[in-house]
Image (cartoon, rainbow, N blue to C red):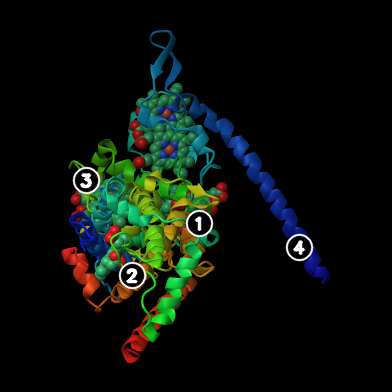
Amino acid sequence: MKQLIIFNLIFTISILTFGQDYITEVVEHSEENSKCFYCHGSPTYSYYNDVLERKVTKRMNPYFLVDSNLYYDQNHKSFDCIDCHAYEFREFPHDNTLQMEPMPTCLDCHEGDEAMAHYNFESINDEFHESVHSTKHSDEFTCWMCHNPHSYKINARNNKNVKETIIYDNNICLSCHADINKYQLISPKVNPNVIDMHDWLPNQLEHFAHVRCIECHTHTSDNVMVAHHIQTKDKAVKKCVECHSSSSTLMASLYKFQAQENRRKYGFFNAAILSDTYLIGANRNLYLNILSGVIFGTILLIILIHALLRILLK
Amino acid sequence: MYLYPLWVRLWHLINALMFLILIVTGLSLQYSSVEYTIIPFNYAVSIHNITGIILAVGYVLYLFANRFTSNGQYYQFPIKGMAGRVWKQARYYAYGIFKNEDAPFPVAIGRKFNPLQKISYVFVMYFFMPIIIITGIGLFFPDLLPDKIFGMLGLHLIDLLHIFMGFILSVFMVVHIYFCTIGSTPLSNFKSMINGWH
Ligand code: HEM
């Protein structure tokens, strides 16, 4: 008992000090980072030009802008820029050869990471390598293509607002599939228009606001929360009933987290979906089904008896 | 006597056909399933939409025609004494008919419908039909629906209402068809609805 209390004390103290550490760390790095943000955080920046011997103001390449608000609200907010980027970036003008610096991959840091085992990075990595993106463009297409290094924040796992998650996740895909400039980082082809290629889908805007691209385009598995195995277009879900039925696959993807407890509520099938939208075919109600069947059956029976009596008593 | 003018018969024919298709496609949407499909979902959606539009247009024409021709008069009744008359008719269907009593309100030029028909047609045509059509239009343009109605998801409430009306109208239709077999012969009413003569 005594040991337990002591252990507990040490444990809480260590957490407290850790937490302390963590907070000062953020503050500390924010000072370091602010030097980078001085240039990379605004559309224009100034520096002292030694050749001209005066201060000059220049425009920042918009693709090299990093939004500090998003940066400090993301998974890696505690990071110093030079944790990932070369130390030499502290100098300006940056050394030209730095452009060729190899960037770390997610797995470099997260592989075998006990504390993050629940994300299952290894399986995600395997799934990604089987996806169309990777099989067709293995070298250019990295995890960073979808996970913006300066703003990616987990949503599906902890955002209670499913609609926000949907918008967030779809914007990841649309960042290429609706923007030719980013698309052509990967492929010289012209990206097919998203609206046109889903012409077959009725109420398209409603669908895209309530369902993620990956719902139809990935092969789901049990040990990964967000499926990464994007398949070729001929394998995409086109059968409406895969979602519009009591065995809706949405419960295994978008509503994976809520799925266990919310299969049925007040008799509504797949009730978890009802907190965000109503899905015909998937949200029928058990009690209403039975009730309507009973009423209809009773009426048919009465009609039958009436008809029989009419014939017999004629 | 000539009771059903051509437009009534045409409207009724189209209405009944659309109704049957709507019931079948509507059921297959509501009870869609991966294992057994009545009609593939995407076809069911298209067919349900098209037949629904035809039904709604037909309904509007029916409203106009009833307003501007003499057929509308059959749908009017004095509230006073209505309960008694409906009861009389109901008693006849539940009891008198088996005793070979005479119908209390036989068809006549000024009286196409008996009180029970009258009240059910009025409810169906001026209450249930408008609701199912308006909610149907709402479901056709789901992005126009309010997000929340009375704290409930707008889409869900409208859909429940639509399905509920569909159920009531389906029940009406079955009962309606059955009552139509109560005529001088079981088929005579159907013949009237084809050639117009009673
Ligand atoms: C296959 C299905 C149907 C059949 C066989 C059928 C049959 C008939 C027949 C034989 C009549 C003439 C008898 C009478 O005046 O009561 C009639 C009249 C009528 N039916 Fe139907 N019916 C069907 C569906 C429907 C539906 C779905 C509705 C409405 C939603 C409807 C509404 C009416 C109305 C309002 C009248 C009176 C029309 C008038 O003369 O102004 N019927 N029906």
Disc 4, disc 2: CB below 8 Å?
A: no
Residue at coordinates 29% horizontally, 53% vertically from top-left? B71
State the CA–CA distance, disc 4 to disc 1: 40 Å
Work out which residue is located at the far bottom of the displayed protein and give it: A312
Dots 3, 1 in contact, CB < 8 A: no
Residue B29 falls in image quadrant: bottom left
C-alpha separation, residue under disc 2 versus residue under disc 1? 54 Å
For mark 2, does the 10 Å Cα neighbourhood hold few (<14), some (14 to 19), or many (20 or more) residues?
Answer: few
Badges 3 and 2, same chain: no
Query: In this rendering, do the residues under marks 3 and 4 share a single chain?
Result: yes
- Tell us which disc is closer to us: 4 or 2: 2
Which numbered marker is on residue A275?
Answer: 1
The one nearer the camera, B1 or A5, is B1
Q: Mark 3 or 4 closer to N-term?
A: 4
Q: Is residue A185 above or below residue A314?
A: above
Q: Give the crowd class for mark 4: few <14, some 14-19, many >=20 residues within 10 Å.
A: few
Three-letter code for the amino acid on which mark 4 is drawn: Asn
Give the camera-side residue of B149 and A311: A311
Residue A225 falls in image quadrant: bottom left
Label 2 or label 1, whichever lies nearer to me, is: 2
